[in-house]
């Protein structure tokens, strides 16, 4: 990760500091293939001497392999995010809190007052990826017998052998 992707608290003003990220060196290439980085925008605002609010937006076109048919397809990753960065230790871990608020979930405690923007963008790209990568809702997948891509080909499997325990199913009529 390049040092230019790191921003020290001292470089952030009390007003809004905007950054447009053009370099895609932070992108998680081992997870999926980046086709186009459409936008990576970051706004930073110092709230207190030891607290910074980061708000951002990420849009990128990536290429996945479909989990059903193994065909490549393009997918648009799109997410908005925000974090609070604080220097020091998380004191709430020592308290017996019963509930956490939204700010608690979005607060990152740092050892030193430096934010790694590349790390944040990488994390958001991975979180924005779908769990199941399906090329389309109507994807029929692969035939488990012959491996035909059912969207383009017909199944080449032979009919069920007569000595198969499933052969009796042919005798049932559809109603």
Image: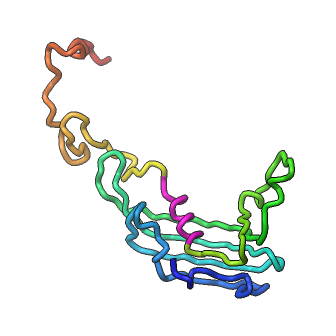
The quarter of the picture where residue 6 lies is bottom right
Which residue is at 41% across, 51% downward?
A: 133
As rendered, which of 35 and 49 lies closer to the eye?
Answer: 49
Q: Position of residue 40 (x, y in %)?
A: 54, 76
In the rendered image, residue 132 lying in the magenta stretch gets the answer no
Q: Position of residue 5 (x, y in %)?
A: 57, 80
Q: Position of residue 43 (x, y in %)?
A: 67, 79
In this rendering, the answer to whether 100 lies above or below 5 is above
Left or right relative to 3: residue 11: right
Q: How is the image coloured?
A: rainbow
In this rendering, the answer to whether 129 lies above or below 83 is above
Which residue is at 25% across, 46% downward?
A: 151
Which residues fall within the magenta stretch? Answer: 119-130
Left or right relative to 68: residue 121: right
In the rendered image, residue 122 lying in the magenta stretch gets the answer yes
Q: Determine the main secondary structure of the stretch shown in magenta.
A: helix
As rendered, which of 10 and 124 lies closer to the eye?
Answer: 10
The quarter of the picture where residue 111 lies is bottom right
Left or right relative to 171: residue 85: right
Q: Position of residue 17 (x, y in %)?
A: 69, 85
Left or right relative to 116: residue 148: left
As rendered, which of 166 and 122 lies closer to the eye?
Answer: 122
Which residue is at 79% across, 74% downward?
A: 51
Which residue is at 82% across, 56% downward?
A: 92
């Amino acid at each position: 990760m390049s040092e230019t992707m790191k921003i020290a608290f001292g470089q952030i003003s009390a007003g809004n500091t905007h950054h447009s990220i053009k370099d895609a060196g932070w992108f998680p290439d081992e997870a999926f293939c980046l086709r186009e980085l459409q936008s990576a925008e970051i706004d930073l605002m110092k709230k207190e001497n030891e607290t910074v609010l980061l708000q951002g937006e990420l849009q990128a076109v990536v290429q996945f392999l479909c989990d059903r048919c193994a065909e490549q397809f393009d997918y648009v990753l799109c997410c908005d995010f925000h974090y609070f960065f604080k220097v020091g230790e998380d004191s709430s871990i020592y308290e017996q809190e019963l509930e956490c608020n939204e700010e608690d979930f979005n607060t990152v405690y740092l050892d030193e007052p430096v934010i790694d923007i590349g790390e944040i963008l990488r994390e958001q790209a991975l979180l924005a990826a779908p769990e199941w990568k399906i090329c389309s809702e109507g994807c029929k997948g692969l035939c488990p017998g012959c491996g035909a891509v059912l969207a383009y080909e017909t199944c080449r499997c032979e009919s069920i052998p007569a000595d198969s325990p499933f052969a009796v199913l042919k005798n049932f009529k559809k109603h």
